[in-house]
Amino acid sequence: MADPTPSPALPSTADADPYVPVSWMAVAASIVAGAFAAALAVLMASAFLSKKPLLVDELFVFPVLGVVLAFAARRMIRNSEGTRTGENLANAAWWVCLVGGLGYAAYLLGVSYSVRRDAAGEAERWARYVADPDGDEGKNLNRAFLRTREPGRRGDFNPADAARLRAEFRDEYVVFLQTDLARLARRNGGGALRFAPGGITGWTDKPGMVECSYAGTFECPEGTFPVEIPLRGLERTARAEGAAGREWMVGLTPNGYVAREKVTLTPYGWRVFELEQLGGAVGREFVQRSGGGVGARAYLYQTLVNPEPLPPAAAQGASLLLAVLRPLTRLDPTVLLFTPDYPAHMQNEFVRLPGGGDPPTDKKAQFARQWSEFGLFLPGRRLQGNDKIDAGDLLSVTDAAVEVRVACEVPVPAAGGGSGAARGRLVVRCADPAVVSELKALRDQAKPGEGTATPPDEFGKKQVPWRVVRVESDLHEVRVERPGPGGPGG
């Protein structure tokens, strides 16, 4: 019997290499890495075309997430005993995220260093202008002011043209000249004020700009004055000189630049501070009392203005005597105070232009009429909001006297009829040789590094003789825009 024919063997249907699924974490890591690379390329191209640095901290989310997913994917694959694959994807995502993230971090560090260096350079240049206000024929303080204006508004201004600066920037220029640092500079010109650089603080990135502060210290015979200089770096537009980078400006702070809680004053500094307070108080009282009527104004002239004043007791006694006799004589009790020199002095000698110049004759006659009817006003009485703009006292020390210029408003006729006002300064002077010589001795002995934060025991206890010598004003009516919450330029 023949053997049956064997059935032919069929080939195996199994794959030679069994199927192993790709790890989902490896896929996710590769997607994140690809998204990071694409976003970085697009944003860098955009930044290059717009000539702006690429400062997007949010980009770091992609490389950090990609590295974490790639690390987890490799661990999962290696622990799967061959049931998962995709390690090449995880490795590629790892290197893309790691190299790209570190490269972008290095780029940001370089940009940050460059920006901080530029900010420090701007602050130190501005501080040098302030420290030498009389330099280059007195232009430096105006240069410092121009650095507080937006780059597009600086134009072709000549720092020597204070009249144009005042006309163009109005309230902001007045505010800057009355900041604590500008007043300190004008009191300590001639190289007496020195600046010690510090460093950048308070860094903030905003769309299109960077805001930060620069800390430093000014030293002079008055003491040491730590300052915070606010800075703003604005991205240049494509039209700005065809270069990338920032244009810098210093913030204008009506509240001042000096960190007052950190100030230490020498005995000379405390004496200057005391005299500024005393002279300012005398000036404000004079301005306030000048609104008390024609008799009050005549009394102020005879006791505080007249080069040969009546003793206050004599002037007051004459007024009281005439007040008693008034019912019998029908005389105004102030008539005795109206000596012939009074109206002539108030018209021809009392009012001066800023700097001491002689006003036109018609302006002097106008002032005499307004003085006779109204007197003077404290800031804010006629010019709304002026008490926030032009109210600080300005002290100056010379070899012959100490002068305090107290802010006031001088009544003038309004252009459209009615009552207006001009800005003015009432000059209060102490020419007592004892006070002047004491100040000079204290200044010569001053050691800024040995100042104190508390006043000496004799602070406020010395009597100082003051005279009111004049009012300084251009006698031009001004109109003040109501300042916002941050003040003019804030």
Image (tube, rainbow, N blue to C red):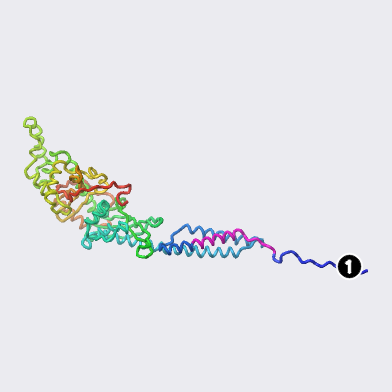
Left or right, residue 112 beside residue 282: right
Q: For the image shown, how many numbered marks are present on the structure? A: 1
Q: Is residue 377 above or below residue 211?
A: above
Asked whether 6 falls inside the magenta stretch, the response is no
Percent position (x, y) of residue 340? Answer: 6, 43
Question: Judging from the image, what secondary structure is the residue with disc 1 in?
Answer: loop
Q: Amino acid at mark 1?
A: Pro
Q: Quadrant of residue 25?
A: bottom right
Percent position (x, y) of residue 31? Answer: 56, 60
Nearest the camera: 106 or 26? 26
Nearest the camera: 115 or 275? 115
Counting other residues with Cα less than 10 Å from the Cα at mark 1, is it few (<14), some (14-19), or many (20 or more)? few
Q: Which residue corresponds to mark 1?
A: 4
Left or right, residue 323 beside residue 39: left
Look at the image and tell me in which quarter the N terminus lies. Answer: bottom right
- Magenta stretch mostly in which secondary structure? helix
Going by the picture, which residue comes out furthest to the right?
Answer: 1
Nearest the camera: 265 or 304? 304
Going by the picture, which residue comes out furthest to the top?
Answer: 328
Stretch in magenta: 18-39
Asked whether 30 falls inside the magenta stretch, the response is yes
Percent position (x, y) of residue 132? Answer: 24, 60
Percent position (x, y) of residue 489? Answer: 31, 52
Going by the picture, which residue comes out furthest to the bottom?
Answer: 2
The answer to whether any part of residue 219 appears in the image is yes
The answer to whether any part of residue 282 appears in the image is no
